[in-house]
Amino acid sequence: MQDGLFPEASPANDSADRVYIRVAVERGLDRGSADATLTYAAPADPLGSNEVRVGGAVEVPLGRGNTPTRGIVIQTGGADLLEGFDPKRVKAIGRVLGAPLTPDLVELARWMSRYYQCPLGMTLASMIPAAVKADTGRRTQVLLSPTAAVGDPPPEGVALPPTARRAWQAMGALDADAFPASARDLADAIGERSIAAVNRLVRAGLLAEHRATTVRAREEDQDGVFHASTTLAPTDAQSDAISAVAASFGSFARHLLFGVTGSGKTEVYLHLLDRVLDLGMSAIMLVPEIALTPQTAGRVRSRLGPERVAVLHSGLTQAQRNRAWSRVTSGRCPVIVGARSAIFAPVDRLGLVIVDEEHDGSYKQDQLPRYQARDVAIKRAHQAGCPVVLGSATPSLESWRAARTGASTLLRLPARVGGRSMPEVRVVDMADERRTEAAATGRSPRELIVGPTLRAGLTDVLLGGGQAVLLLNRRGYAGLVACSSAACGWQQMCDHCDAKLVLHQDTSLRRGGYVRCHHCHAEQIIPDRCPDCGSKLQRLGAGTQRAEAALEAATADLPPEHRLVTGETMLRVDADTMRTARDYFEALGRFARGEVRALLGTQMIAKGLDVPGVRLVGVLSADTSLHLPDFRASERTYQLVSQVAGRAGRGDLPGRVIVQTFEPESAAIVRAASHDFESFADDELRMREVVGLPPVWRMARIVCRDRDPAKARRAASEIAEAIRGPIEGLGGRIDGPMPCPIERIADHFRIGIELTAPNAEAIQRVLRLARDRGLVKSDANTAVDVDPVSLM
């Protein structure tokens, strides 16, 4: 009997012989457990050549309507999987879709599901790219292979017309790897316009046909500017680091590669990857941003060979992503380079995991499952029994504390390669810069974007033929449109969020631009005057668009060949100009080739960029993140200033860094200027230990959201009351319920609860309690963030 599309399992009398499978469907099943699964019967008849196995994708009937639903097999077995359930009521799976995940990835997903409090099915679904699920770009081709020695005279009895004979002889000059190939490819290879001669060789039996399934995709952009084709002799510090990691091959070990900017961390990675390949094993290397991928991937490919390296990141087309995944699955690419989700690559014999710039906040996923890729990488290495290397010039305090307490091995690269010195960093007080500018011009600027010190330094570098990197971590033209009357106080706010609207310049519009919310992306026009009192409006707070104009003006008096001109000698690199991965790659390539003299951008240009011509780095405002209502604000400020400063002086000439700030005495800025990470980190850790904050304590955050603020507060209060006793009983504390720093986003009011405890186990126990009681669900109204990196 059939119910809908799917047959029921066989009668109970043969249930003992049936194979049953547990499936995690790609839905949010919150049945009291994050890893809730459903049990189905495997088909009595194998469906084609596919077998049901752990990690395999299947289509199963779900619910009363037997809705065909995709899921992943997490366990196979006999009737014991039924746990007493009536075999007659067990449905059979519908289709076997293939095996996109390996069993070790299923185990990794089960850990992630429990730790990050996300349904297992949704966790597994996030591991598999959409392009792989849709099998984008897969085509079946007819390929040809020779049945006799190519180019030799045809066997006796085989008569060929002159065109086919010439084609056969021409194929003799092709390399052995030219076969198998399509008729069109073979015709092109031997210079034939038509495939008629090739088809004649098929009919003569000299070429045999067979069908092959391949994934076709446009070739990825590979800029030859970023390469590392020559194996360099490592420095003593690099050799020590390489030896220490290599000594742990074959077993789990956690290493923190702490090296100043320009100390050659990438070269250490390349030597280690080479050694892993020599052992016949595979490796995964993570980078934090798409913008870093062409540089890192280019160097790895040029050193190890492009055929052995697959690149995985969201900037690829769907077909390119599916092809890369297919090459990894087949074992043809043992080295994977990519952003956050590349940690889920289905490799065999994993021998090494590398997380470059491990401190970077983009390793944290901001949607379900809210995982930290650095920590998932550590867990995957632990499961595989291989070492993991975390590299950074400004390690996260989590990794630094682990090294200080002996949980990981600290490997140091204390100096730049080639004897190059660290750049000289000068911190300038913008209050003093304003006074200097006023004295020189006779007027006091309301907002000074490029101070006289930075302007002079930029002039020297441009006239000397050098390049500059200029950082301002704020997009748009101005951060606020407000009434000029102090008595009024009107500001242009988002109608849907508790946030100020950011002005974006657009000269094609009557008022010269529009305002946009950077949270919900709503846009508004700019009024002519204040809608409350009729006064003129003012535009406050500079963004990268405004800085662009200021830099052009600051260099306007230079000879034409040295001026900064947007789009020609200066590029703006932010989320508004870099719409696709190709935009990033082209901009970085032009800068690396010296076609562009200056890069102006947000934090995406602050790390990884290794261009010898950069002799000046200018931080236009070091204060943009210093006063955010987040305990990590000081740490992020140090990392950002230190990382962007490290872009200078990587060539033969020394580099300079000019940091503009209104708080020149800030510990984060002072320590970054002196390249003193250890003192900054140790002081910060002592402070966090005193007040009980991560990484010394552990944290989780629950945010309740609703269009009705009363409902959001009620839900948060119910959760807080239920878990307050348990968390305090385990030595922890609960803060809240309280409005989030930005209380309303996209018309949803947000009430937060913060849990802190001396260890992760206490946090997990309390979150499981809340989930078991049905108070915390994986839906649009509740967000659970374990180990949050932002409290905004």
Image: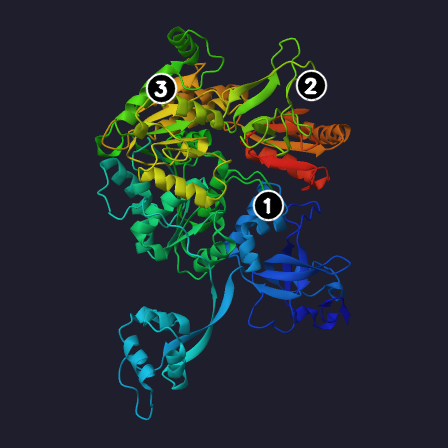
Select label 2 or label 1 by which is in front: 2
Give me the C-alpha separation between circle 2 and circle 3.
38 Å
Label ID, residue 531: 2
User: Of marks 2 and 1, which one's residue comes earlier in the chain?
Assistant: 1
Select label 2 or label 3 by which is in front: 2
Label 1 sits on a secondary structure element that is helix
Residue 391 appears left or right of 692:
left
Residue 655 visible in the picture: no
Please provide percent x and percent y for residue 146. 35, 79
Give the residue furthest to the bottom.
157
Is 600 or 606 nearer to us in this picture?
Answer: 600
Label 2 sits on a secondary structure element that is loop
Residue 102 appears left or right of 773:
left
Locate residue 306: give its quadrant.
bottom left
Say what amino acid the circle numbered 2 marks: Pro
Please provide percent x and percent y for residue 600. 41, 30
Count of all numbered marks drawn on residues in the image: 3
Quarter of the image with the N terminus in it: bottom right
Select label 3 or label 1 by which is in front: 3
Q: Which residue is mark 1?
A: 113
Label 3 sits on a secondary structure element that is helix
Say what amino acid the circle numbered 3 marks: Arg
Residue 268 visible in the picture: yes
Give me the C-alpha separation between circle 2 and circle 1.
50 Å
Residue occupying the point 22% across, 32% down: 652
User: Of marks 2 and 3, which one's residue comes earlier in the chain?
Assistant: 3
